[in-house]
Structure formats: C-alpha cells, structure tokens
Image: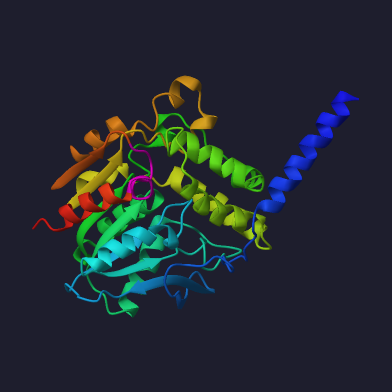
Amino acid sequence: MMRSVLAATAVLAATLSASAVETYGPELEGFEYPHEVKRFGFSSQRQDVSMAYMDVRPERPNGKVAVLLHGKNFCGATWEGTIAELTKAGYRVIAPDQIGFCKSTKPAAYQFSFQQLASNTAGLLSSLGVEKAVVIGHSMGGMLAARFALMMPERVEKLVMVDPLGLEDWQAAGVPWLPIEKAYEGERKTTFDSIKAYQLKFYYNGQWKPEYDRWVQMQAGLYAGPGAERVAWNSAQTSDMILTQPVVHEFPDLRVPTVLIVGGKDRTAPGANRAPAEVAARLGRYDLLGRATVARIPNSVLVEFPELGHSPQVEAPDRFHAALLAELNKP
C-alpha cells in the first residue's frame, strides 16, 4: 500500500513539475526578448532560413559595434545585462540567435559547422553595413567567435571569449563519440529539472540564485513546446559539431587582440559523462585551462574570476561588466 502511495505521489509531482513549465513555439514564440527582434532572411544550404537578432543603438555612440554570440544553452536574450552596459558605454550592439537556436529557423536538414555559423553571422553584419566589430562570444559562442576571427580577422577589432567551450579537445582526451541519433534520444528527455541540475553542477558550483530560473525556463519551454522534435534534433547536431570540430589547435593562428575571461569554478566539459572516470576528472578545469590558453594565443590577456562559474555575466554582472569594459577601453 505504501509503495502505491509513494508511486502516486511521484507521478503527481512529475505532473505538477511538467505543468509548471511554460511552453514556447519552435522559434521561441512566447518568450519576450529585452529589445525588438528583427530577422535576417537568406538562403543557406539550398533552403530559405531566417536569423533572429537584436540591433540596439546607444544614445551617445562611440562609433564602435559589439557583436554578442550566445552559447549552446543560451540565447541572444541572455545577454540582456551586457547589452545594457555596452550601449550605455556607447556601443551599437548586435545580438543574433544562430540558425538552429532560440528564435531562429530550426532546419530539418542542415550541416552544422562553426564555419557555416560564422559565415551566417558575417552575412548578417554585412546586411547591416557593419564591416568591423568587437566580437564577444560566451560558451559555444566563444568557439564560434574564435572561428570567426580565424576566418575573417580583418572584421574583428577585438576578440573576447567568455568561458568558451573548446579550450581543450575532448575527443582527443578520451570522450567517446556519440551517434547523433543517440544524442537525439537524450535531448528528447530534457526537462526543466535536468537543465537546472546540469547548470547547478557545472556552471554555478552548486550555488543557485532564483534569477537563473528564467534562463532555464527559456530552454525548457522550447523542449516542451510544439517544435520539441526539431529543437532536440538541432541540439543533437550542434552537440556533435562542438565535439568533432575543435578550434583549440588553431589558437596560435589567431591574429587579433584577444581577451579570455574565465570563471575558475567552471567545470563544463561536454561529453565528460560518457568518458572513463579518470578522463572526466581531468576535463573542464577552467582554473588551469585559462592560463594554458593565453600562453598559446598571441597578443592575449586573461581575466580570471576564481570564485565564479561558467556564466560570470549572469552570476556577477557588475564585476563582469566592469572588467569587460576595462579591457575594451584599452588601446
């Protein structure tokens, strides 16, 4: 009898948890962004796609443009606080959602690569008349920012990578490859609770703040909405892109001024859960990776926040933005 009661209670709790998650459309319809969302339509890989973006102008322009590139589990909206600080400082800020993410098109068939996403971003900037910008990327967006700078250094005034993925080659380190179909099965099981648990462990060193829930809800609402299958498939594809397209080996080839900002408590290492325990223990050590990385990138500086995690711009926005602007103001 007690087992039946416990089972019923568990089912009820799961039902309540699921019902508490607000669902959004396949292009994040229903989730409000902090600024007007515009669209850049173009043809890519023999299909028409649409890239959502915010283009925020400052009251007192300093003549510079900052491009903000989101991470895999984030969107352009997550840069809300950074947009406010940069525009206050005079920057025009452009924050796109990459194809396959957030408010942009979720293609049924697309060959995802960092080169393709960088090319898409360059096309957006050209359409807006922007030829050169400060490029700031967080998490997966940091890998993308590095690829953008490697491909088009003449378009990058300064490169800023915030807790970027790809400071190590996980596959070479021992993380086994996962077929996209298997990754898709895992993505279909994504819930508010699973997203929160992952971020709590790897992003925030076990310390949660209520304001983080909004960004978990943003992702969970996509996975629970009417576009769930397409969202999960694109997510599986981009997870494969992150694992199999390392940029770390090309860091010495970067030829733009570079700022690397890392939280010392960050332990993000995609696929580490599939690796042997002794391999997983060595991965995601941003307290060590930051210093090793700047030693390999010419003309680079490291900004460390030893007590912060994967998202310093969310975890400690005042300190992060003060450090970011200090670096951007350097000649």
Residue 212's spot in the image, x, y percent? 47, 48
Front residue of 186 and 31: 31
Q: Is residue 297 visible?
A: no
In this rendering, would 251 be left or right of 81?
Answer: left
In this rendering, would 73 be left or right of 169?
Answer: right
Q: In percent of the image, x 52 and y 62: which residue is there?
A: 102
Residue 150's spot in the image, x, y percent? 26, 56
Q: Is residue 261 visible?
A: yes
Q: Quadrant of residue 8?
A: top right
The residue most toward the top is 278
Q: What's drawn in magenta, residue-wise?
A: 308-316
The residue most toward the left is 331
If the image is split into quadrants, where does the C terminus sit? bottom left
If the image is split into quadrants, where does the N terminus sit? top right
- The number of callouts visible is 0
In this rendering, would 153 be left or right of 198?
Answer: left
- 207 part of magenta stretch: no
Front residue of 134 and 181: 134
Q: In percent of the image, x 53 and y 31: which residue is there?
A: 273
Q: Quadrant of residue 157?
A: bottom left
Q: In percent of the image, x 66 and y 57: which residue is there?
A: 228
Residue 151's spot in the image, x, y percent? 28, 60
Up the image or down, 69 lies above or below 62; here it is: above
Q: In percent of the image, x 46 and y 71: which residue is there?
A: 52
The residue most toward the right is 1
Colour mode? rainbow
Front residue of 136 and 277: 136
Up the image or down, 58 lies above or below 292; here it is: below
Up the image or down, 10 lies above or below 312; here it is: above
